[in-house]
Image (cartoon, helix red, strand yellow):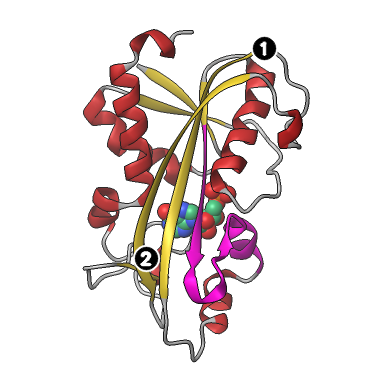
């Protein structure tokens, strides 16, 4: 089964296909622009994005939104992680964390799978949400922010995220990332759903 995945991030597509392979699901990247709404919730951002893209192509598809939530920074950058990564990057986060001993953090991923939408009123305000059929699948992984960047693999904040119970960052150990990551958990839930709900996926 093929599922369209609207994203500009090829790493996300590769990671999703690592999971999909086991279920006979293949995620195909499509590059359709969608405006990211301003929200603290990656689920809401993913949902609004999926609804927007659906209005463009009228075919079932997924949008994934994710972020790094740092406890001692009041969950910053969270749903604004892409913006933070582009503006201050890894070094900026390390600077913000300078002298902070509580380095607990988590990565969160939300996959929005949309199969239909009757009427799109507005994708910007939840009180005028479209009458759409969107399922959200979430995953998270706990860990800590390292004091320096380590590793060359992966993307984004991978070099400074060390998952709980492991000694390497995601950027040093992609095998571990693919086995336990927020994205892996969210896509596993989606694939389980697709496997057990064949009628809905063709609507
Ligand atoms: P978005 O989901 O495309 O809005 O991007 C979220 C941002 O969070 C990315 O640009 C990365 O900086 C960060 N991020 C999300 N998931 C990961 C991950 O698996 N590894 C490293 N950084 C991530």
User: Badge 2 is on which residue?
Assistant: 152
Q: Quadrant of residue 33?
A: top right
Ligand 1 within 8 Å of the CB at mark 2: no
Farthest-out residue, bottom = 99
Residue closest to the eye, 168 or 107:
107
Mark 1 CB in 8 Å range of ligand 1?
no
The residue under label 1 is: 118
Q: Is residue 73 magenta?
A: yes
Residue, x 40% and y 68% (percent of image)? Answer: 159
Q: Is residue 72 magenta?
A: yes
In the image, which residues are magenta?
Answer: 63-87
Q: Is residue 87 left or right of residue 103?
A: right
Residue 128 visible in image = yes
Give the residue drawn at x 69%, y 20%.
Answer: 55
The mark that comes first in sequence, 1 or 2, is 1
From mark 1 to mark 2, how far is it between C-alphas? Answer: 45 Å
In the image, taking residue 7 as reference, residue 23 lies left or right, namely: left
Please give the name of the residue rendered at 56% of the width and 15% of the height, measured from the top-left corner.
59
Say which quadrant the N terminus sits in: top left
Q: Is residue 95 above or below residue 192?
A: below
Q: Secondary structure at mark 2?
A: loop
Q: Is residue 108 above or below residue 120?
A: below
């Amino acid at each position: 089964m093929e599922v369209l995945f609207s994203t500009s991030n090829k790493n996300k597509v590769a990671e999703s296909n690592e999971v999909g392979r086991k279920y006979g699901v293949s995620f195909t990247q499509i590059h359709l622009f969608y405006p990211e709404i301003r929200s603290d919730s990656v689920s809401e951002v993913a949902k609004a994005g999926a609804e927007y893209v659906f209005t463009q192509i009228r075919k079932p598809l997924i949008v994934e939104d994710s972020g790094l939530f740092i406890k001692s920074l009041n969950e910053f950058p969270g749903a604004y992680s892409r913006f933070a990564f582009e503006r201050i990057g890894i070094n900026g986060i390390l600077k913000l964390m300078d002298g902070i001993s509580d380095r607990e953090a988590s990565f969160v991923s939300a996959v929005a799978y949309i199969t239909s939408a009757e009427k799109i009123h507005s994708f910007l305000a939840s009180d005028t949400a479209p009458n759409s059929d969107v399922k959200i699948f979430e995953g998270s992984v706990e860990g800590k922010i390292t004091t320096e960047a380590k590793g060359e693999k992966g993307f984004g904040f991978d070099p400074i995220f060390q998952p709980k119970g492991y000694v390497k960052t995601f950027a040093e150990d992609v095998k571990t990332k693919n086995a336990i990551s927020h994205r892996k958990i969210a896509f596993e839930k989606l694939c389980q759903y697709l496997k057990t709900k064949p009628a809905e996926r063709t609507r």
